[in-house]
Image (spheres, rainbow, N blue to C red):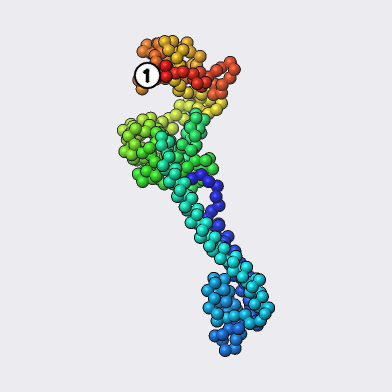
Amino acid sequence: MPTVVRSPWWTLARRFLLVLGVMGLTVLIVYLDRDAYADNNDPTGEMSLVDAIYYTTVTLSTTGYGDIAPVTDTARLINVFVITPLRVAFLILLIGTTLEVLATQGREMFRISRWRNKMEQHVVVVGYGTKGRSAVETLVSNGHTRDGIVVVDPDPGAIQDANNDGLTVVVGDATRRDVLRRARVANASQVIITTSRDDSTVLSVLNTRQLNRTAYIVAAVREGDNVPLVRQSGADAVITSSDAVGRLLGMSAVSPALGSVLDDLLTVGNGLEVAERELLVPEVGKQPQALADQVIAVVRDNRVHHYYEPVVTQLARGDKLVVVRPAEELPWAPRPGTHGEDTSEEE
């Protein structure tokens, strides 16, 4: 879960050093005043360094065998006012560490259980590399909350990046079904797969589709030859990253202005954006070219039609529009469909 915490090893090492410090200080105090102690098991009654270490151990742990004991008033006072507080500190460190570990594990288990119970219709992003991060930022900029996005990745660096971005991460390989189950893929509404290898993408799509028959799966592949295979595996949409980048490079070389516009369309939050919105009530019966937004496609009965096709010459109730519009609303360029207007479906 996305939290900022210190490493448990760092915490344990710090407490272990504190315990050693308490024991070392106690040994030093006892050994310097060793003449004030009597060893009942030694005929001479003298204390050695080993005896001091032994006495410190049984005293701080409250075992207290009684074979070594202070015999002078000074040593007894030192035990009361110095050794006893050190014993309390020693016990606090030991018990505190145990309680903290148990409490931390309990809190984490409770958080995970609560998360699993409420996680429905979320988005699962497999892979948090460059493509995965860009996909998440696009989702967030289009209204998705970070609480509703789950990242699946085995790489420690990607896990740390996702946690820093406020995302929940399931650690593991998405080609394994148990990892996808932990990500609650069966309850997800969308799954975005951005693995670094096409064979891993195919296995991830297959497992995802077997766990969830209705989720919309988008997958990225490196080679165009693998697109049919990924589609047959169950992906609803397949993006060829190498071909897309190649086309953008070629267009930029042929026409720098065209390349700049396409790059603008792919950049979130600035300039122009491509968006899908509902058809509004006043727009029913109009031609796509007559609307305030620049309509480039019409979605009707789950089929995508170009704006110029005869079948969508007149917009009908229930249509959805794919438009190009300013990324930010401007006084001279309002954004229809973002002010709570009645849609044709609601009407």
Horizontal side of 186 relative to 109 (left or right) equals left
Which residue is painted at 31% across and 33% down in the image?
Answer: 232
Horizontal side of 260 relative to 192 (left or right) equals right
Which residue is painted at 54% across and 64% down in the image?
Answer: 94
Which residue is painted at 37% across and 33% down in the image?
Answer: 215
User: Where in the figure is residue 12, as x and y percent of width and height?
Assistant: 54, 59
User: Where in the figure is residue 164, as x and y percent of width and height?
Assistant: 54, 43
- Please give the residue where the numbered disc 1 appears in the rendered image: 300
Asked if residue 287 shows in the view, the reply is no
Q: Nearer the viewer, residue 242 or 29?
A: 29
Q: Residue furthest bottom?
A: 43
Residue 308 placement: quadrant: top left
Which residue is painted at 48% across and 27% down in the image?
Answer: 248
Asked if residue 160 shows in the view, the reply is yes
User: Where in the figure is residue 87, as x and y percent of width and height?
Assistant: 59, 69
Residue 196 versus residue 54 in the image, above or below: above
Residue 177 placement: quadrant: top left
Q: Secondary structure at mark 1?
A: strand
Q: Nearer the viewer, residue 134 or 145?
A: 145
User: Where in the figure is residue 133, as x and y percent of width and height?
Assistant: 49, 37
Q: Residues within 10 Å of mark 1 (few under 14, many from 20)?
A: some
Where the C terminus falls, by quadrant? top left
Residue 326 placement: quadrant: top right
Residue kind at label 1, given as amino acid type:
Arg
